[in-house]
Image (cartoon, rainbow, N blue to C red):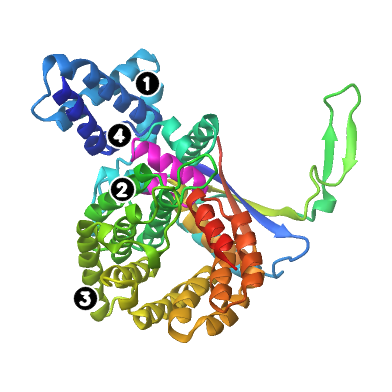
């Protein structure tokens, strides 16, 4: 079962910034233990662009699709046997990244 | 005819959770398990009065429910897809020998009380899948529309399936944390029965307190070594023992100091005391008691006194001091202040209570406690204002009646 694991940052109380060495070590373990599918950090939401081409004319707007205090700062895709396994890893990920983590299964 | 009805009622109480849990293990699908179990009981209702009660009702129901489950898979003509899904969801790995008791019902309880489910959804699902309560019964108990309750159960089941919440007992390392969630659900059910909310409902829902006790007994039988399970069961029994003495014929709450102690249930008290003694022995051997065990011990002190004047308040206060360390919530601090009032007088207690105002201003018991202390200090006007606030905030009809009478007695 695959899970999308989102790293949630907060504009008003951001997590401490440089967690990269810890995250790298955590990633290596995810790979070694067979959980790792994909991971990536994201640029600031300001760098996002939304495009809507459902109507006659496409509309391009600057910024993310939803403005909120909290935003997606990065993501993983994990392969885990069940939610408990994913939650155990997510608890660790939250410590390693110093941020909230959302775990959501792929349909 | 009556024998069959009795047998069905008994089988429903005793076997529902076992049948559902067994089917869940077999088919790996909560919906299918529940529907097949319901069909098996419906078949029993149709057959037993005519054919007689089978010698082993539990086995009969299990066999019938299994057959119904398979029929259902065939009938839906999705056998392959469902089977694959069942295999995917069910835990086919050999049972981990981690020293934890294996029981299908225990797995089902932990699945229904998974921490990733919202608390109200856990309560609804537990009452449905383990308690076997019907949707209207659960909805009525928690004063929500039936379709809201139905949605909660549907949503919880859907999440279990989509997020792949495992059907298993947590590993030994996770167990203590997960049991506390199970106990929180059971205590919530009990409290809703003991102090039912809402103007349209009776003050006590004996069916719910009985159900909470029954489910806690089940968890206790499955996890006899867990101190907090024993503590919660003891707490419920000692509280339930006083239930009938707690409400007057006019539906008014009778506070502890005015209750007729002869009306307390001696069998429940004896059983509760036995459990508390068992936990005291464990505490003496070095096991640190959790909040339910301490609350049960407080209940044991109260139920040991034949008269309110014989209450060992210093013992009660010592237990509250211990409880504050485990659970430093303002509500515990408020209850501790009541014991302080008995030992050191209302003035000392009032100082403690007043310090809790910012946190508890919206809580009726805060104002009710203040009102009682102010009354004892002769400050009638302040007491009246405090009763008014408490009455505004109280949701239980018996409590409102008692507070109103107390207020109207003031000079």
Location of the C terminus of chain A by quadrant is: top right
Vertical comparison of B343 with B260: above or below: below
Q: Position of residue B137 (x, y in %)?
A: 42, 34
**Mark 1 in CB contact with mark 2 (< 8 angstroms):** no
- Measured in 3D between alpha carbons, the distance from the residue under mark 2 to the one under mark 3, in whole angstroms, is 25 Å
Nearer to us in this view, B39 or B208? B208
Say which mark, if any, is on residue B20.
Answer: 4
The residue that label 1 is drawn on is B80
Residue A41 seen in the figure: no
Say which mark, if any, is on residue B215.
Answer: 2
- Residue at the spot x=90%, y=21% of the render? A56
Q: Label 1's element? A: helix
The residue that label 3 is drawn on is B281
- Measured in 3D between alpha carbons, the distance from the residue under mark 1 to the one under mark 3, in whole angstroms, is 55 Å
Single out the mark in the foreground, 1 or 2: 2
Residue B267 seen in the figure: yes
Single out the mark in the foreground, 1 or 3: 3
- Measured in 3D between alpha carbons, the distance from the residue under mark 4 to the one under mark 1, in whole angstroms, is 22 Å
- Measured in 3D between alpha carbons, the distance from the residue under mark 2 to the one under mark 4, in whole angstroms, is 15 Å
Q: Label 4's element? A: helix
Single out the mark in the foreground, 2 or 4: 2
Mark 3: few/some/many CA within 10 Å (<14, 14-19, 20+): few
- Measured in 3D between alpha carbons, the distance from the residue under mark 4 to the one under mark 3, in whole angstroms, is 37 Å
Which chain is home to disc 3?
B
Question: Tag 1 or tag 4, which sits nearer the N-term?
Answer: 4
Which chain is home to disc 1?
B
- Residue at the spot x=24%, y=80% of the render? B284
Mark 2: few/some/many CA within 10 Å (<14, 14-19, 20+): many
């Amino acid at each position: 079962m695959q899970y999308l694991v989102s790293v949630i940052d907060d504009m008003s109380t951001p997590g401490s910034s440089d967690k990269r060495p810890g995250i790298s070590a955590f990633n290596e373990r995810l790979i070694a233990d067979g959980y790792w599918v994909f991971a990536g950090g994201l640029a600031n939401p300001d760098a996002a662009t939304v495009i809507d081409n459902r109507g006659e004319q496409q509309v391009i707007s600057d910024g993310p699709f939803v403005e909120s205090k909290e935003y997606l700062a990065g993501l993983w895709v994990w392969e885990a046997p069940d939610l408990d396994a994913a939650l155990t890893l997510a608890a660790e990920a939250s410590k390693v990244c110093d941020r909230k983590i959302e775990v959501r299964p792929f349909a | 005819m009556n024998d069959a009805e009795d047998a069905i009622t008994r089988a429903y109480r005793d076997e529902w959770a076992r049948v559902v849990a067994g089917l869940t293990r077999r088919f790996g699908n909560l919906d299918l398990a529940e529907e097949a179990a319901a069909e098996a009981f419906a078949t029993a209702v149709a057959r037993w009065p005519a054919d007689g009660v089978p010698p082993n009702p539990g086995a009969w129901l299990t066999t019938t429910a299994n057959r119904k489950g398979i029929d259902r898979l065939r009938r839906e003509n999705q056998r392959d897809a469902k089977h694959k899904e069942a295999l995917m969801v069910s835990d086919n790995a050999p049972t981990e020998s981690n020293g934890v008791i294996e029981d299908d019902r225990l797995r089902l309880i932990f699945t229904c009380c998974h921490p990733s489910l919202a608390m109200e959804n856990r309560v609804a699902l537990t009452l449905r899948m383990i308690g076997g309560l019907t949707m209207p019964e659960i909805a009525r108990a928690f004063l929500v529309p039936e379709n809201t309750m139905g949605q909660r159960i549907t949503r919880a089941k859907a999440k279990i399936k989509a997020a792949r919440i495992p059907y298993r007992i947590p590993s030994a390392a996770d167990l203590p944390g997960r049991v506390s969630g199970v106990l929180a659900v059971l205590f919530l059910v009990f409290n809703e029965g003991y102090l039912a909310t809402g103007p349209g409902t009776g003050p006590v829902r004996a069916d719910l307190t009985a159900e909470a006790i029954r489910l806690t007994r089940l968890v206790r039988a499955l996890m006899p070594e867990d101190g907090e399970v024993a503590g919660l069961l003891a707490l419920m029994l000692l509280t339930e023992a006083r239930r009938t003495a707690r409400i007057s014929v006019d539906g008014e709450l009778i506070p502890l100091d005015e209750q007729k102690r002869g009306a307390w249930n001696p069998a429940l008290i004896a059983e509760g005391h036995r459990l508390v003694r068992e936990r005291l022995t464990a505490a003496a051997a070095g096991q640190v008691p959790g909040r339910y065990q301490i609350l049960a011990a407080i209940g044991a002190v109260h139920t040991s006194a034949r008269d309110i004047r014989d209450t060992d308040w210093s013992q009660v206060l010592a237990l509250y001091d211990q409880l504050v360390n485990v659970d430093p919530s303002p509500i515990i601090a408020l209850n501790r202040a009541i014991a302080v009032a008995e030992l050191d007088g209302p003035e000392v207690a009032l100082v403690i209570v007043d310090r809790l105002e910012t946190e508890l201003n919206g809580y009726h018991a805060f104002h009710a406690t203040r009102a009682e202390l102010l009354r004892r200090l002769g400050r009638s006007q302040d007491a009246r204002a405090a009763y008014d606030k408490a009455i505004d905030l109280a949701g239980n009809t018996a409590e409102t009646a008692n507070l109103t009478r107390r207020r109207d007695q003031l000079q």
